[in-house]
Image (cartoon, rainbow, N blue to C red):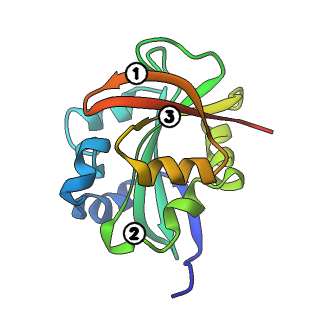
Amino acid sequence: MALAHIKLAVYQPQHRQALCAYRLPENQLPFAYQPYQWLSEPLASELAINAHLCAVTVLADGQPVGFFVLDNGALCLNHQRQPGAVLLRSLSINPAYQGQGIAKAAVAAHRLDAVVRQHDPDSQRLILGVNRCNTVARDLYLAAGFYDTGVYINGVAGAQHIFQRKFA
């Protein structure tokens, strides 16, 4: 199957139904909030009023198939501000579309960095936490040019490696 045309767009209310309809498989649940969790109360109110948060939809051939949140807030990571950094949170792809290269296309530097800079023009790098057990995500981010900083934090589902990628 040919890879769909992938685009990242700031979340729009018309994306809600498709994003809230999918549920991640049990083995992925510990690693990310699902879109319906972000788009339901109380997180939906937080997204609406917090200028540090930006919800992003992954579109495949114009259809919402994935979701993540960008966060450049004061509590960016492990309750410490990371100057110049934007935190990538809760990337997920609808299970019906997984395995087609959509996540890889979504985190490709030319695509992801553009939407990050739209959210925070002064940003210098992306950071994220990858659970040590989530080898699929680890491999995805390494292939997209992120590197493991060697810093670890305790997350809800255990130890997380802190990855980052600086902008060119």
Crowdedness of circle 2 by 10 Å Cα count: few (<14), some, many (20+)? few
Query: Would residue 10 appear left or right of 49 to someone viewing this image?
Result: right
Image coordinates for residue 21, horizontal then vertical, percent: 23, 64
Q: Which residue is mark 3?
A: 128
Mark 1 crowdedness (10 Å alpha carbons): few <14, some 14-19, many ≥20:
some
Compare residues 78 and 120 and report the one nearer the observer.
78
x and y, in percent, of residue 82 in the image: 57, 17
Q: Earlier in the sequence, mark 3 or mark 1?
A: 3
Nearest to the observer: residue 101 or residue 12? 101
- At x 63%, y 16%, the residue is 83
* In contact (CB < 8 Å): disc 2 and disc 1: no
Of the two numbered discs 2 and 1 on the same chain, state the one appearing first in sequence. Answer: 2
Q: For the residue marked with disc 1, what is the amino acid? A: Ile
What separation in Å lies between label 2 and label 1 (alpha carbons)?
Answer: 28 Å
Is there any visible trace of residue 36 in the rendered image? no
Seen in the image, is 147 located left or right of residue 133? Answer: right
**Residue extending farthest bottom:** 1
Query: Residue at left 62%, top 46%?
Result: 115
Q: Is residue 91 above or below residue 85?
A: below
Residue at the image point whose x is 59% and y is 63% from the top: 105
The residue labelled by disc 2 is 98
The dot on residue 69 is none
Kindly state the secondary structure of the residue where label 3 is placed: strand
Instruction: From the image, state whether disc 2 or disc 1 is nearer to you.
Output: 1
Please give the label number shown on residue 153.
1
Q: Is residue 135 above or below residue 23?
A: above
Q: Is residue 88 left or right of residue 19?
A: right
The answer to whether any part of residue 164 appears in the image is yes
Residue at the outermost right position? 168
**Secondary structure category for the residue under label 1:** strand
| Quarter-of-image position of residue 113 | top right
